[in-house]
Image: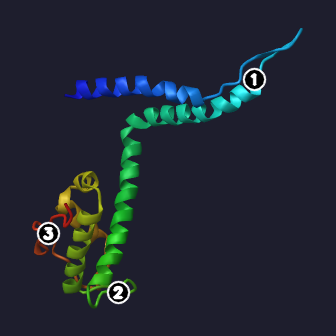
């Protein structure tokens, strides 16, 4: 099936390309009596846009296999960004939660569930998988929120196994 589509695309490009060639004007060498003038400047300007595309393609191709350490740094930055936005959203959604004060355990549990739901909804699936799924997200959120003095969150008390993405 894909061979037929590729063949159809090639045939279409074969028939369409002369129409584009008619519109293209390429400066040619001008021959005057004893002197031949070659318009290098015009050729370079015409090649500039193609050179930019070729360089961008080469850089993209070169970045396809980044070292694992660089990939993990990029993913960690994405995780931090997602979780910080999620914590802010969770604090805004739970009554009694505030960013400038430490939370009690019941409020923190609600915030953790809201943040995990936010991360699952808004984060890319590959990033959630890299964090260890919803349980991994929960552990990372618990590590980032502030709890009131003398209080402790029991990670097992917060059930996040039922959290699924709300969008298709």
Residue beneath the point at 41% across and 22% down: 14
Residue beneath the point at 22% across and 53% down: 129
Camera-nearest label, 1 or 2: 1
Residue 107 image offset from top left, x and y in percent: 23, 85
- In the image, residue 135 sits, relative to residue 50, either above or below, namely below
Residue at mark 2: 98
Secondary structure type for disc 1:
helix
Q: Nearer the viewer, residue 152 or 123?
A: 123
Residue at mark 1: 40
Q: Specify which label sits upstream in the sequence, 1 or 2.
A: 1
Residue 67 image offset from top left, x and y in percent: 39, 37
Lateral position of residue 118 relative to residue 56, left or right:
left
Lateral position of residue 31 relative to residue 70, left or right:
right
Residue 163's disc is: none
Q: In which quarter of the image is residue 122?
A: bottom left
The Cα–Cα distance between marks 1 and 3, rounded to whole angstroms, is: 66 Å
Q: Quadrant of residue 12?
A: top left
Lateral position of residue 166 relative to residue 15, left or right:
left
Q: Do the residues labelled 2 and 3 touch (CB within 8 Å)?
A: no
């Amino acid at each position: 099936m894909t061979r037929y589509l590729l063949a159809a695309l090639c045939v279409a490009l074969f028939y369409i390309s002369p129409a584009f060639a008619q519109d293209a004007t390429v400066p040619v060498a001008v021959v005057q009596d004893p002197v031949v003038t070659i318009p290098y400047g015009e050729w370079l300007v015409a090649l500039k846009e193609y050179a930019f595309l070729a360089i961008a393609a080469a850089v993209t191709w070169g970045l396809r296999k980044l070292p694992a350490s660089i990939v993990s740094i990029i993913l960690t930055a994405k995780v931090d960004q997602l979780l910080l936005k999620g914590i802010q959203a969770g604090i805004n959604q739970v009554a009694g939660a505030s960013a400038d004060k430490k939370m009690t355990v019941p409020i923190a549990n609600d915030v953790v569930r809201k943040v995990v739901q936010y991360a699952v909804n808004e984060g890319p699936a590959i990033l959630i998988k890299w964090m260890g799924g919803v349980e991994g997200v929960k552990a990372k959120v618990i590590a980032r929120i502030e709890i009131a003095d003398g209080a402790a969150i029991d990670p097992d008390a917060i059930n996040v196994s039922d959290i699924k993405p709300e969008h298709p």
